[in-house]
Amino acid sequence: MQSRLGFLQLETVVVTGHDVERIGQEQRLMLQKLEAGLEAHRALLQQLQKQEIESLILLLGKGDLGASEKDPCLEDTRVALLDSIMRWTLDSSSESKHCFCLLGMAGSGKSAIAATIADRLKASRHLGARFHFARNKERNNGVILALARQLASWGDERLQPEIASAIKDEREIAQMRPETQFRKLIQEPLESLESTSPPLVIVLDALDECDPKYVSTLLQLIRNGLAKLPVCVKFFITSRAEPQLLYHFDSEPMKSRRTVHTLTDEDAQVVDGDIGTYFKEKLPEVVGPLLKDPSDWPGEERRRALVLKAQRLFLWATTATRIIADPNMGRDPEKKLARLLSSEHQGHLDAIYGQILGDACPAVIDNDTPDTISLFRNVLGTLVVARAPINICTIASFLDSNESHHKGLSENIRFNVLRYLQAVLIIPGVDIAEPAEDAEPIRFIHTSFIDYLSDTSRCDSRYAINVAEHHERMTIGCFRQMLQLKQNMCNLDPSLLNSEVGDLEQRIQDHIPRGLQYACIHMPAHVSSVPTDNSVVAGLIDDFSKTRLMFWLEGLSLMGRARESVAMATVIEPSRPESHLCHQDHRLQLLPDFSGGVL
């Protein structure tokens, strides 16, 4: 209010203590609301960032690819060696080596040791990633992406945003060269860790089973990057002592940063004791339903004899146990044990594999099915040369072109061939009367059985597999399967991109049989294994390029495998210049563009 003289006249306001307290409460309430709003905003941002990171990581594909394949060591076995490896994983001193290379022959237990180490590291939160290589499996080439996704999920929490940032910068990194993938997704994120960070171990098992060219690239990338990695980052690698791998292990800068342990150098008495422990625990378990008192079967003396036969090969011990456990190889464990002990060969996988096949083949013949030996060999040959694991129904579809025969043939394969081979094969659904189209695939328990079957100097000629012959048969089978290809097999709306079809996976399963899926994806690999002067295959390629090429490209796109089109062009163009495909320049020009943009 203003006075007559122009001066501002202030009113006197009396503020009580109650008013001060009320105003203070209002201010505090406003501040709390503001802080709550900011906190909610921060939480929302963090949630959005987390979702973005997770969606970016998903672009790397399946994170569990190759993550777990083998059973760990039996409790109270390999104790000293496992303790030694675990001490190395936790050693953060500057003298600690980056790599631990465990070498050993086939069947010596390397994969069981790797599985045990990986399980222990995961339990202690020191496992960065794990990968088990499998022979002739296409997934091996996805090892870098699988390791990166696992590092983002299991490893140090600081790695996830680093890896996500690399993917955000390079959205097509899943299709880039291994060198770029390794540098962006593995090397640079790991370099960001401090040396004082907790140990982080990457487990690579059965490295020798990977394609020689690819494994050479992978080892060179690891070798060249070791010097830049903090001491907390370690690689545990198992392999046979292959010359190519030893070259990398013995070359700098890896040589000065690795420890090598060879299983053959182990104390024989310790290994024999471990195998004895295995027999003592497992044999009473597998004969339990057949004997009145299995508790100590077969007794100390015969256990010692089995240990002597094994000659420090854990694979011999586990295979012998499977023979005794398998009722399809006879229900009398005493007779089966006597046969194992009467063998003249000690610690020789060939002898035990020969016994399995010898027991299985007479059983097949006794069932009096037509062409039983041929069927036996063709089933095993198909499994040996297959580029990915396949199930019983898929085998049948490759062995007989008449679809009406497939059901009966599947049952014949299951009942008369595969059920006798459970000591060397993992066969899901072998006891189910009618094998399902979507059944899990069959797997070899150990690749040494593939080596045995493929070597005519080791394997009986009745069972030996001619690999080249079976690749030709599979190549012909692939082209026969692809006669089913047609335009828009999955009945899609042509106005939609593949990524916009919500039930695309189900449509693929409903409309593209497993055998046809296999043929579309792996035909190039089988073609490349057939001599270039094979006139039958050349004719099939020529007909395929005229009548089915575009349908094949469509099928590959649906399955997210369009890059296989480049593999086909690479296989055919330089090796089969007479092929019609090579003269269809406009078609060949489509391949790189089509492969780079899977919808």
Image (tube, rainbow, N blue to C red):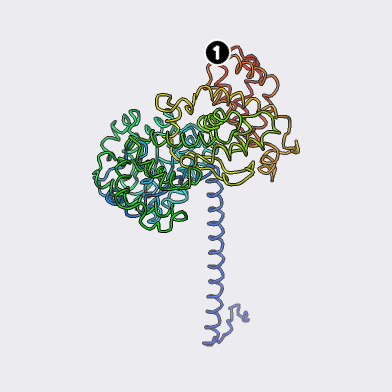
Q: What type is the residue that disc 1 sits on?
A: Asp
Quadrant of res 480: top right
Q: Say which element carries label 1.
A: loop
**Relative depth, front residue between 477 and 388:** 477
Out of 582 and 423, give the one closest to the viewer: 423
The answer to whether 13 is drawn above or below residue 126 in the figure is: below
Classify the position of the N terminus by image quarter. Answer: bottom right
Instruction: Point out residue 382 in the picture as x, y percentages from the top left corner.
Output: 54, 30
- Which residue is disc 1 drawn over? 533
> What crowding class fits label 1: few (fewer than 14 Cα within 10 Å), some (14-19), or many (20 or more)?
few
Where is residue 476 drawn, in percent x and y? 61, 23
- Residue at horizontal 59 percent and vertical 25 percent from the top: 592
Q: Quadrant of the C terminus?
A: top right
Residue 257 shows in the view: no
Total marks shown come to 1
> In the visual, does 261 lie left or right of 349?
left
Against 581, residue 347 (above or below) is below
> Residue 126: x and y, percent?
37, 52
Q: Is residue 439 visible?
A: yes
Seen from this angle, which residue lies furthest top?
578
Instruction: Tell me which corner region of the image, top left, top right, bottom left or bottom right, holds residue 453.
Output: top left
Tell me: 454 left or right of 30: left
Please name the residue shown 56% across and 40% down the image: 441
Depth check: give the residue in front, 419 or 65: 419
Question: In front: 495, or 2?
Answer: 495
